[in-house]
Amino acid sequence: MTSITTFVDSISESIKSFNKFCVVVYWLQDDTDREGIFQELSVRLAGTRLLPHVLRTSAFQDPNAWASDAMSILSSLRSDILNLDDDGHESPLGVVVISRGKMNVAQASSPAIAPDWLPGHGGREVIVFARDVRLISTCSLSAEEACIDSIKSSLFGLEHALLKIVRTKFETERHFGQKLWDQVLRERSRLEKKSQFPDYWSKGLDSVTDPSSYRPSLTSGWSMISAMWDTFLSASPSQLLAKSDAFREYLTIGADWLPSSPDPSPLFPIMFRGPEDHRRSVEELAARGVVLSVGLSCQLTTASAHADQYGRVSASTLSGLSQDLRRTLAAAERQAGWTAQAATRNIE
Protein backbone atom coordinates (compact mmCIF):
# COMPACT_ATOMS: atom_id res chain seq x y z
CA MET A 1 0.00 0.00 0.00
CA THR A 2 1.24 3.47 -0.85
CA SER A 3 2.28 5.49 2.21
CA ILE A 4 1.13 8.95 3.25
CA THR A 5 4.73 10.12 2.96
CA THR A 6 4.81 9.09 -0.68
CA PHE A 7 1.46 10.77 -1.36
CA VAL A 8 2.64 14.03 0.19
CA ASP A 9 5.98 13.99 -1.62
CA SER A 10 4.32 13.22 -4.96
CA ILE A 11 1.61 15.86 -4.62
CA SER A 12 4.14 18.47 -3.50
CA GLU A 13 6.34 17.67 -6.49
CA SER A 14 3.41 17.63 -8.91
CA ILE A 15 2.12 21.07 -8.06
CA LYS A 16 5.55 22.55 -8.78
CA SER A 17 5.03 21.64 -12.44
CA PHE A 18 2.31 24.29 -12.77
CA ASN A 19 4.07 27.62 -13.32
CA LYS A 20 1.09 29.95 -12.98
CA PHE A 21 -2.18 30.17 -11.08
CA CYS A 22 -4.62 27.31 -11.53
CA VAL A 23 -6.61 25.00 -9.32
CA VAL A 24 -5.41 21.40 -9.12
CA VAL A 25 -7.72 18.72 -7.74
CA TYR A 26 -5.71 15.79 -6.38
CA TRP A 27 -8.02 12.80 -6.03
CA LEU A 28 -7.10 10.35 -3.28
CA GLN A 29 -9.31 7.28 -3.00
CA ASP A 30 -9.54 5.58 0.39
CA ASP A 31 -12.39 3.55 1.83
CA THR A 32 -10.83 2.74 5.21
CA ASP A 33 -9.86 5.84 7.20
CA ARG A 34 -10.59 9.08 5.40
CA GLU A 35 -10.66 11.09 8.61
CA GLY A 36 -7.27 9.73 9.68
CA ILE A 37 -5.78 10.59 6.31
CA PHE A 38 -7.33 14.06 6.48
CA GLN A 39 -5.78 14.72 9.89
CA GLU A 40 -2.34 13.53 8.79
CA LEU A 41 -2.43 15.51 5.56
CA SER A 42 -3.55 18.61 7.46
CA VAL A 43 -0.40 18.40 9.55
CA ARG A 44 1.99 17.53 6.74
CA LEU A 45 0.64 20.11 4.29
CA ALA A 46 0.35 22.94 6.83
CA GLY A 47 1.83 26.17 5.49
CA THR A 48 1.50 25.15 1.83
CA ARG A 49 -1.06 25.92 -0.86
CA LEU A 50 -2.34 22.36 -0.67
CA LEU A 51 -5.54 21.81 1.30
CA PRO A 52 -7.07 18.42 2.18
CA HIS A 53 -10.84 17.90 1.93
CA VAL A 54 -13.00 14.87 2.75
CA LEU A 55 -15.64 14.49 0.03
CA ARG A 56 -19.06 13.88 1.55
CA THR A 57 -21.24 14.70 -1.48
CA SER A 58 -21.85 13.16 -4.90
CA ALA A 59 -19.65 15.73 -6.63
CA PHE A 60 -17.35 14.85 -9.53
CA GLN A 61 -19.76 12.34 -11.06
CA ASP A 62 -20.65 14.47 -14.10
CA PRO A 63 -17.67 14.83 -16.47
CA ASN A 64 -19.17 18.08 -17.76
CA ALA A 65 -19.49 19.68 -14.34
CA TRP A 66 -16.48 18.51 -12.36
CA ALA A 67 -14.62 21.83 -12.65
CA SER A 68 -17.67 23.62 -11.18
CA ASP A 69 -17.72 21.03 -8.41
CA ALA A 70 -14.13 21.98 -7.66
CA MET A 71 -15.20 25.62 -7.22
CA SER A 72 -17.87 24.47 -4.75
CA ILE A 73 -15.18 22.74 -2.73
CA LEU A 74 -13.12 25.93 -2.75
CA SER A 75 -16.12 27.71 -1.25
CA SER A 76 -16.28 25.14 1.54
CA LEU A 77 -12.60 25.85 2.21
CA ARG A 78 -13.00 29.64 2.06
CA SER A 79 -11.61 30.43 5.51
CA ASP A 80 -8.57 28.19 4.96
CA ILE A 81 -7.85 29.77 1.58
CA LEU A 82 -8.20 33.30 2.91
CA ASN A 83 -5.66 32.46 5.61
CA LEU A 84 -3.04 31.49 3.04
CA ASP A 85 -0.05 33.70 2.30
CA ASP A 86 -1.26 36.86 0.50
CA ASP A 87 1.84 36.84 -1.69
CA GLY A 88 0.92 33.50 -3.26
CA HIS A 89 -2.05 34.57 -5.39
CA GLU A 90 -0.24 33.75 -8.62
CA SER A 91 0.88 30.33 -7.42
CA PRO A 92 -1.17 27.18 -8.09
CA LEU A 93 -3.75 26.19 -5.51
CA GLY A 94 -4.21 22.49 -4.78
CA VAL A 95 -7.06 20.61 -3.12
CA VAL A 96 -6.55 17.00 -2.03
CA VAL A 97 -9.99 15.41 -2.29
CA ILE A 98 -10.22 12.30 -0.12
CA SER A 99 -13.02 10.11 -1.44
CA ARG A 100 -14.33 6.59 -0.98
CA GLY A 101 -14.88 6.22 -4.71
CA LYS A 102 -12.63 6.26 -7.75
CA MET A 103 -12.06 9.39 -9.78
CA ASN A 104 -14.70 9.38 -12.52
CA VAL A 105 -13.28 12.21 -14.58
CA ALA A 106 -10.31 12.21 -16.92
CA GLN A 107 -6.94 13.51 -15.76
CA ALA A 108 -7.45 16.63 -17.81
CA SER A 109 -8.18 20.34 -17.49
CA SER A 110 -11.33 22.43 -17.74
CA PRO A 111 -12.22 26.12 -17.25
CA ALA A 112 -14.45 27.33 -14.41
CA ILE A 113 -15.48 30.65 -12.89
CA ALA A 114 -13.75 31.24 -9.58
CA PRO A 115 -15.79 32.37 -6.53
CA ASP A 116 -15.99 36.16 -6.16
CA TRP A 117 -14.04 36.09 -2.88
CA LEU A 118 -10.99 34.20 -4.24
CA PRO A 119 -8.02 36.57 -3.77
CA GLY A 120 -6.60 37.84 -7.05
CA HIS A 121 -8.94 35.77 -9.21
CA GLY A 122 -12.47 36.30 -7.91
CA GLY A 123 -15.13 36.08 -10.61
CA ARG A 124 -12.61 35.26 -13.32
CA GLU A 125 -12.21 32.18 -15.43
CA VAL A 126 -9.52 29.86 -14.07
CA ILE A 127 -8.19 26.54 -15.30
CA VAL A 128 -8.86 23.48 -13.15
CA PHE A 129 -6.75 20.33 -13.45
CA ALA A 130 -7.57 16.85 -12.13
CA ARG A 131 -4.94 14.34 -11.02
CA ASP A 132 -5.32 10.86 -9.50
CA VAL A 133 -2.86 10.75 -6.61
CA ARG A 134 -2.35 6.99 -6.76
CA LEU A 135 -1.45 7.17 -10.45
CA ILE A 136 1.01 10.04 -10.16
CA SER A 137 2.68 8.89 -6.93
CA THR A 138 6.33 7.96 -7.21
CA CYS A 139 8.87 6.90 -4.65
CA SER A 140 12.42 5.70 -4.14
CA LEU A 141 13.26 2.00 -4.40
CA SER A 142 14.12 2.19 -0.70
CA ALA A 143 10.70 3.59 0.26
CA GLU A 144 8.44 1.69 2.63
CA GLU A 145 6.31 0.55 -0.33
CA ALA A 146 9.10 -1.91 -1.18
CA CYS A 147 8.94 -3.60 2.27
CA ILE A 148 12.62 -4.48 1.88
CA ASP A 149 13.09 -5.69 5.47
CA SER A 150 10.18 -8.09 5.02
CA ILE A 151 11.65 -9.43 1.77
CA LYS A 152 15.03 -9.93 3.46
CA SER A 153 13.39 -11.81 6.33
CA SER A 154 11.50 -14.00 3.86
CA LEU A 155 14.69 -14.82 1.97
CA PHE A 156 16.40 -15.73 5.24
CA GLY A 157 13.45 -17.88 6.32
CA LEU A 158 13.41 -19.68 2.97
CA GLU A 159 17.17 -20.26 3.18
CA HIS A 160 16.74 -21.93 6.58
CA ALA A 161 13.87 -24.10 5.36
CA LEU A 162 15.87 -25.25 2.33
CA LEU A 163 18.82 -26.21 4.53
CA LYS A 164 16.56 -28.46 6.62
CA ILE A 165 15.47 -30.31 3.48
CA VAL A 166 19.03 -30.85 2.33
CA ARG A 167 20.30 -32.04 5.71
CA THR A 168 17.53 -34.63 5.89
CA LYS A 169 18.06 -35.87 2.33
CA PHE A 170 21.78 -36.32 2.89
CA GLU A 171 20.90 -38.74 5.69
CA THR A 172 18.60 -40.85 3.52
CA GLU A 173 19.96 -40.74 -0.05
CA ARG A 174 23.46 -41.92 -0.74
CA HIS A 175 23.87 -40.21 -4.10
CA PHE A 176 21.78 -37.18 -3.24
CA GLY A 177 22.34 -33.88 -5.04
CA GLN A 178 24.91 -34.87 -7.64
CA LYS A 179 23.27 -32.89 -10.45
CA LEU A 180 23.18 -29.52 -8.63
CA TRP A 181 26.61 -30.19 -7.14
CA ASP A 182 28.12 -30.70 -10.58
CA GLN A 183 26.26 -27.82 -12.25
CA VAL A 184 26.32 -25.15 -9.54
CA LEU A 185 27.51 -25.84 -6.01
CA ARG A 186 30.98 -27.34 -6.56
CA GLU A 187 32.33 -24.25 -8.33
CA ARG A 188 30.53 -21.78 -6.07
CA SER A 189 31.49 -23.38 -2.75
CA ARG A 190 35.02 -24.53 -3.74
CA LEU A 191 34.56 -27.52 -1.44
CA GLU A 192 36.08 -30.90 -2.18
CA LYS A 193 33.04 -33.01 -1.28
CA LYS A 194 29.34 -32.37 -1.69
CA SER A 195 28.73 -33.83 1.78
CA GLN A 196 30.59 -30.83 3.25
CA PHE A 197 28.13 -28.36 1.82
CA PRO A 198 25.32 -28.49 4.46
CA ASP A 199 27.75 -27.62 7.29
CA TYR A 200 29.29 -24.85 5.17
CA TRP A 201 25.79 -23.56 4.44
CA SER A 202 24.77 -23.73 8.11
CA LYS A 203 27.88 -21.85 9.23
CA GLY A 204 27.10 -19.06 6.76
CA LEU A 205 23.52 -18.77 8.02
CA ASP A 206 24.70 -18.68 11.64
CA SER A 207 26.71 -15.56 10.80
CA VAL A 208 23.47 -13.66 10.10
CA THR A 209 22.35 -12.03 13.36
CA ASP A 210 19.24 -10.21 12.07
CA PRO A 211 16.97 -11.79 9.43
CA SER A 212 15.60 -8.38 8.41
CA SER A 213 19.11 -7.25 7.50
CA TYR A 214 19.93 -10.40 5.51
CA ARG A 215 21.19 -9.33 2.10
CA PRO A 216 22.41 -12.18 -0.11
CA SER A 217 25.61 -11.72 -2.05
CA LEU A 218 26.33 -13.24 -5.44
CA THR A 219 29.74 -14.28 -4.14
CA SER A 220 28.41 -16.17 -1.08
CA GLY A 221 29.41 -19.72 -1.94
CA TRP A 222 27.49 -21.14 1.03
CA SER A 223 24.08 -19.64 0.15
CA MET A 224 21.43 -21.54 -1.82
CA ILE A 225 19.52 -18.29 -2.27
CA SER A 226 22.61 -16.71 -3.84
CA ALA A 227 23.01 -19.74 -6.10
CA MET A 228 19.43 -19.28 -7.33
CA TRP A 229 20.05 -15.58 -7.84
CA ASP A 230 23.21 -16.25 -9.84
CA THR A 231 21.33 -18.77 -11.97
CA PHE A 232 18.57 -16.24 -12.59
CA LEU A 233 21.09 -13.64 -13.79
CA SER A 234 23.34 -15.88 -15.85
CA ALA A 235 20.73 -17.97 -17.69
CA SER A 236 18.82 -16.76 -20.72
CA PRO A 237 15.03 -17.11 -20.52
CA SER A 238 15.22 -20.24 -22.65
CA GLN A 239 17.95 -21.75 -20.43
CA LEU A 240 16.37 -20.88 -17.11
CA LEU A 241 13.83 -23.70 -17.15
CA ALA A 242 16.52 -26.36 -17.66
CA LYS A 243 18.86 -24.84 -15.08
CA SER A 244 16.07 -24.54 -12.51
CA ASP A 245 15.41 -28.27 -12.80
CA ALA A 246 18.58 -29.07 -10.83
CA PHE A 247 17.17 -27.02 -7.93
CA ARG A 248 13.86 -28.86 -8.27
CA GLU A 249 15.57 -32.21 -7.91
CA TYR A 250 17.84 -31.08 -5.07
CA LEU A 251 15.10 -29.42 -2.99
CA THR A 252 12.06 -31.52 -4.01
CA ILE A 253 10.27 -28.43 -5.34
CA GLY A 254 6.64 -29.17 -6.22
CA ALA A 255 3.78 -27.29 -7.81
CA ASP A 256 2.53 -26.24 -4.36
CA TRP A 257 5.67 -24.14 -3.76
CA LEU A 258 3.97 -21.29 -5.61
CA PRO A 259 0.82 -19.50 -4.37
CA SER A 260 -2.43 -20.94 -5.68
CA SER A 261 -6.15 -20.25 -5.43
CA PRO A 262 -7.68 -18.53 -3.49
CA ASP A 263 -4.46 -16.46 -3.41
CA PRO A 264 -3.52 -14.61 -6.61
CA SER A 265 -1.17 -16.43 -8.95
CA PRO A 266 2.37 -15.00 -8.89
CA LEU A 267 2.89 -12.69 -11.85
CA PHE A 268 6.48 -13.31 -12.90
CA PRO A 269 6.29 -17.07 -13.51
CA ILE A 270 3.39 -16.25 -15.85
CA MET A 271 5.37 -13.56 -17.67
CA PHE A 272 8.25 -15.96 -18.30
CA ARG A 273 6.14 -18.70 -19.84
CA GLY A 274 7.25 -19.73 -23.34
CA PRO A 275 5.69 -21.59 -26.28
CA GLU A 276 7.21 -24.94 -25.23
CA ASP A 277 6.23 -24.74 -21.57
CA HIS A 278 3.15 -26.88 -22.13
CA ARG A 279 5.51 -29.82 -22.64
CA ARG A 280 6.98 -29.37 -19.15
CA SER A 281 5.66 -30.70 -15.86
CA VAL A 282 4.05 -28.40 -13.31
CA GLU A 283 6.95 -29.21 -10.96
CA GLU A 284 9.51 -27.99 -13.50
CA LEU A 285 7.55 -24.78 -14.04
CA ALA A 286 7.22 -24.28 -10.30
CA ALA A 287 10.98 -24.64 -9.84
CA ARG A 288 11.58 -21.94 -12.41
CA GLY A 289 9.00 -19.78 -10.66
CA VAL A 290 10.81 -20.14 -7.35
CA VAL A 291 14.20 -19.31 -8.90
CA LEU A 292 12.65 -16.32 -10.66
CA SER A 293 11.05 -14.99 -7.49
CA VAL A 294 14.21 -15.45 -5.44
CA GLY A 295 16.32 -13.79 -8.13
CA LEU A 296 13.99 -10.81 -8.47
CA SER A 297 13.79 -10.45 -4.68
CA CYS A 298 17.58 -10.31 -4.46
CA GLN A 299 17.68 -7.81 -7.31
CA LEU A 300 15.19 -5.57 -5.53
CA THR A 301 17.00 -5.66 -2.18
CA THR A 302 20.27 -4.77 -3.91
CA ALA A 303 18.71 -1.97 -5.96
CA SER A 304 17.10 -0.62 -2.81
CA ALA A 305 20.51 -0.34 -1.16
CA HIS A 306 21.60 1.87 -4.09
CA ALA A 307 18.27 3.63 -4.60
CA ASP A 308 19.87 7.02 -5.27
CA GLN A 309 21.24 5.64 -8.55
CA TYR A 310 17.83 4.77 -9.98
CA GLY A 311 15.58 7.77 -9.45
CA ARG A 312 11.92 7.43 -8.54
CA VAL A 313 9.54 4.71 -9.69
CA SER A 314 5.77 4.24 -9.70
CA ALA A 315 4.73 3.73 -6.08
CA SER A 316 1.78 1.49 -6.93
CA THR A 317 3.94 -0.69 -9.21
CA LEU A 318 6.65 -1.05 -6.56
CA SER A 319 4.08 -1.90 -3.90
CA GLY A 320 2.47 -4.54 -6.13
CA LEU A 321 5.84 -6.02 -7.07
CA SER A 322 6.90 -6.30 -3.44
CA GLN A 323 3.61 -7.86 -2.42
CA ASP A 324 3.81 -10.43 -5.21
CA LEU A 325 7.37 -11.41 -4.30
CA ARG A 326 6.65 -11.63 -0.56
CA ARG A 327 3.59 -13.78 -1.13
CA THR A 328 5.59 -16.14 -3.38
CA LEU A 329 8.53 -16.38 -0.95
CA ALA A 330 6.13 -17.11 1.91
CA ALA A 331 4.48 -19.94 -0.03
CA ALA A 332 7.88 -21.44 -0.92
CA GLU A 333 9.09 -21.22 2.68
CA ARG A 334 5.90 -22.84 3.97
CA GLN A 335 6.09 -25.73 1.53
CA ALA A 336 9.82 -26.18 2.11
CA GLY A 337 9.14 -26.49 5.83
CA TRP A 338 6.51 -29.17 5.22
CA THR A 339 8.84 -31.00 2.83
CA ALA A 340 11.55 -31.09 5.50
CA GLN A 341 9.08 -32.36 8.11
CA ALA A 342 7.86 -35.11 5.79
CA ALA A 343 11.42 -36.18 5.06
CA THR A 344 12.21 -36.28 8.78
CA ARG A 345 9.17 -38.50 9.47
CA ASN A 346 10.36 -40.90 6.79
CA ILE A 347 13.66 -41.28 8.62
CA GLU A 348 11.91 -42.00 11.91
Image (cartoon, rainbow, N blue to C red):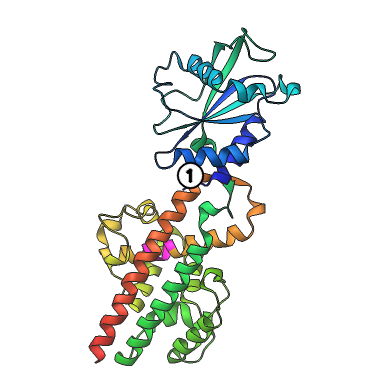
Whether 232 is among the magenta residues is: no
Residue 241 seen in render? no
Front-lying residue, 54 or 248: 54
Report whether 194 appears left or right of 122. left
In the rendered image, the residue lying farthest to the right is 87
Magenta region, residue range = 289-293
Q: Quadrant of the C terminus?
A: bottom left
Residue 96 percent coordinates (x, y): 54, 31
Picture quadrant of residue 23: top right
For label 1, the SS is helix
Residue 159 against residue 239 in the figure, above or below: below
Front-lying residue, 131 or 237: 131
The residue sitting at 48% across, 44% down in the picture is 316
Residue 246 percent coordinates (x, y): 37, 74
Report whether 278 appears left or right of 302. left
The residue sitting at 43% across, 58% down in the picture is 325
In the rendered image, the residue lying farthest to the top is 123
Front-lying residue, 276 or 111: 111
Picture quadrant of residue 168: bottom left
Q: Looking at numbered disc 1 in the image, what kind of residue is underneath it?
A: Ser
Residue 98 against residue 320 in the figure, above or below: above
Residue 32 seen in render? yes
Majority SS type along the magenta span: helix
Report whether 105 appears left or right of 331. right
Residue 53 percent coordinates (x, y): 52, 30
Residue 223 against residue 242 in the figure, above or below: below
Tell me how many marks there are.
1
The residue sitting at 66% across, 53% down in the picture is 309
Residue 199 percent coordinates (x, y): 47, 89
How many residues crowd around disc 1 within 10 Å: few (fewer than 14), some, or many (20 or more)? many
Dot 1 corresponds to which residue? 316
